[in-house]
Image (cartoon, rainbow, N blue to C red):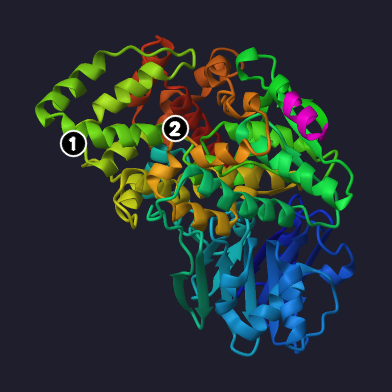
Amino acid sequence: MCGIAGSTRADAQLLQAMASRMRHRGPDAQDVWCENGIGLAHARLAIVDLSPGGAQPMRSPCGRWVLAFNGEIYNHHALRAELEALGENFVSTSDTEVLLRLLMRQGRACLDKLVGMFAFALWDRQDRSLLLVRDRLGVKPLVWAQLPDGGIAFASEIDTLRLQPGLDLSVDRQALSEYLACLYVPAPLTLHAGIRKLPPGHWLEWKAGSVATGRWWAPSYTGERMISLDEAAEEVLPILDSAVRLRMVADVEVGCFLSGGIDSSVIAALMSRAAHETGAPPVRSFTMTFDEPAYDERDAALAVARHVGTIHAELPARPGITDLLDDMVRAFGEPFGNPTALLIHDLSTSARQHLKVALVGDGGDEVFAGYPRYQGGLLGERYRRTVPRPLRGLAAWAARLIPESTSGRHAWRRAREFLSAGTLSPDQMYASWVEYFDPSERRALLALAADPSRPIADIYRQAPSSAALDAMQQTDLLSFLPGNLMSYGDAMSMAVALETRHPFLDHRLVEAVGRMSAATRMEGGKKAILKAVARKLLPSAIVDRPKLGFNPPMGIWLKTDLATMVAERLIRPRMVELGLEWAPVAQLLAEHQGGRRDHSLKVWSLLVLEAWERGQRQG
């Protein structure tokens, strides 16, 4: 895993600056290729083929193509064998060279063969064209910008791309609205008007000032296959086992994050089984611990580690973790409002002292239907069908009277949200559950003439299946997963040069589960298929343990560590400078501080926005 950048209007000095800016992503080497004002930059974290043979940017043997690649092609050994049978002779053992040879022979057609996470740039010196590609589920980031002369620049990170002269770095007001809705800026937008994200599963081709883009893969949750839960588990287990084993292949030690929840526990169990069968040393696992018992999972994680046989270590959360706010903002290059990012940064920093690669359980909820809101969506489907609209309207009005605690308990909040959305269409209902500042709040904050659109509702309506569970999972795989989980996973781990790998996001697994019926996916409750798989690997006490979630005690922080920051930064002059109206901010703060509503994440998102804007002014 690495960092990449490039431009069609660059010199060696600019490219070297880009490579240096990405040193945290690739501390093992930084290099550039430049020719006639066009160049690529690369910062290397050596994981596969640690020799200079894996160095980048990599040129093809004929000299026509130059590749800058970030990520891993997990099935590169099998692809190498196929290419050797066709007469290719390799000079390294790197997956980069395998990808380059595939692109030389097949162009974009080879993408379907790749199992991995990746973002790459291929320059064709003969055709003078650039191909940018991002992996299926958006594990690896890629941002780009059209230059004033018609050229193009790109990078793994916004902060690196900002080194390119001539970019429009003004605030995109639509992106600001969508940040307030989602607490991240959904692709293809960034908060800079002149910088865009390449969406997951997309390619971009540039030639002579012209840009063309297209989608080469998308998830498809259509729920067509009616099979039993046992049949589903028998089908899923070998795919997941293959996904784990492929992600254990590296020329450095590979460990895992272990929370004690079912997702990471299954991965730890499969890793340990694979290590035992191959005679490899025991897997090392890592758990973050907290002083607050309500957030701590050390006992559960230790029980899993002992059962599956990992060498386990506990990594205490650092005190004063909120001091990392400014570092977090710099790593993203734009506001990012999920405070779990701070925990991932802290966990990655500690784990990086022991290894370079860790397998993680991200994606299990999206792929296997693990969120409570999925059950809510199914209930909402029946609610709209069986309860007359006038009664639902009355319930929505009465829901405003439901109290809400700031102690972190969600039952009352979920009941209020469910009833309040009872008269909405399915897409609007789902958006109301997963968005934070609703359209009326954003209209007030941004002084808009009309309510803004709901980005999540827009994605929901485009789902290939209108069935509730299909549409919800499809929506999350295209929005929450890449925009939130993958975004903070990459930014926070790569800030300290730690590579994280995601077995649950193997596209073969996503496709297999997506073809199974909603009834199979929800038979007996959330994560039915994964739990059936887990029972083949783990004792019931672990499988049936209630989900805790990897979330920070934001309510506590806002009353302690962050109280002074809120008082000093969320003030009228700063909100006006951010382009926000003060009255709705003041109301939000009063409701939260008075205990009438839990606005913890909204308050945090405004602190992040303020920190980002201040960082922009200070350069």
- For the question of whether residue 574 can be seen, the reply is yes
Q: Quadrant of residue 11?
A: bottom right
Q: Position of residue 112 (x, y in %)?
A: 56, 71
**485 is within the stretch colored magenta:** no
Q: How many callouts does the rendering have? A: 2
* Residues packed near mark 2 inside 10 Å, few (<14), some (14 to 19) or many (20 plus): some
Q: Is residue 605 left or right of residue 319?
A: left
Image point 72% across, 54% down: which residue?
A: 247
**Which kind of residue does numbered mark 1 sit on?**
Arg
Between the residue at mark 2 and the residue at mark 1, the CA separation in whole angstroms equals 21 Å
**Which kind of residue does numbered mark 2 sit on?**
Gly
* Residue lying furthest top: 594
Q: Position of residue 496 (x, y in %)?
A: 75, 44
Q: Kindly state the secondary structure of the residue where label 1 is placed.
A: helix
Q: Is residue 82 left or right of residue 401?
A: right
Q: Position of residue 330 (x, y in %)?
A: 63, 43
Q: Position of residue 234 (x, y in %)?
A: 58, 49
Q: Nearer the viewer, residue 576 or 518?
A: 518
In the picture, the quarter occupied by the N terminus is bottom right
For residue 525, which numbered disc appears in the image?
Answer: 2
Predominant SS along the magenta part: helix
- For the question of whether residue 12 can be seen, the reply is no
In the picture, the quarter occupied by the C terminus is top right
Magenta residue span: 302-311
The residue that disc 1 covers is: 385
For residue 137, which numbered disc appears in the image?
Answer: none
**307 is within the stretch colored magenta:** yes
Q: Nearer the viewer, residue 617 or 437?
A: 437
Q: Is residue 253 above or below residue 594?
A: below
Sequence order check, earlier mark of 2 and 1: 1
Image point 54% across, 63% down: which residue?
A: 144
